[in-house]
Image (spheres, helix red, strand yellow):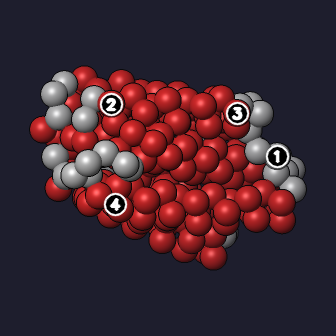
Amino acid sequence: MSERPIPPRPGPGGQEMRLAQMLRVDHAGELGAVHIYRGQRAVLGEAPGRSSVAATLAEMEDHEARHLARFDELLVRRGVRPTLLAPLWRATGFALGVGTALLGEKAAHACTDAVESVIEGHYASQIAEIGDREPELAGELSEFRDDELEHQRQAIEGGAREAPGARLLSSMIRAGCRAAIKISERI
């Protein structure tokens, strides 16, 4: 499910402004994802009989941390400020991770499924938008998108769609992700 690309603003600097929005949002998203997995690991990481899910969450967190580090570099190199809401996204991500993990392993997977479904579409839209003028960055986004799709696949295999209230939980999380994207583009 991909979103429609947003055209750059007309006039001088329009493409640079649009790219700055993209990088700011992607950085914010990866920051939130790292903290979601940290929150989930805080609950499930030491739980008896949960070593398999803890290892999977740690691996996913590592992927997100590498993505975040790359966006840190890109923000500095391109002179883009991060979102001013980074502290809120850290706290919200951690709380979402803790909350879904407290609901159980399948709910934690439902969170991953929902988040990654939005992020996959978001990255696909960005790749389509910048592929011709920023092929190197589009290639990196494609790699990140592949990681996100793998996380989603693992979450589905882990029972994401079998969690109690999975449809409602997923709808709420997807709506929150879409709102965070729109807000982070601007603030």
Residue 159 falls left or right of residue 99: left
Q: Is residue 70 visible?
A: yes
- Of helix, strand and loop, which one carries label 2? helix
Circle number at residue 56: 4
The disc, 2 or 1, on the residue closer to the chain's N-terminal end is 1
| Above or below, comparing residue 2 to residue 85 in the picture | below
Q: CA distance from mark 2 to mark 3?
A: 23 Å
- Of helix, strand and loop, which one carries label 3? helix
Q: Which residue is mark 1?
A: 81
Q: Quadrant of residue 85?
A: top right
Q: Which residue is mark 3?
A: 87
Q: Quadrant of residue 104?
A: top left
Q: Position of residue 182 (x, y in %)?
A: 59, 32
Q: Residue furthest front?
A: 48
Contact flag, marks 3 and 4 (Cβ < 8 Å)? no
Q: Which residue is mark 2?
A: 102
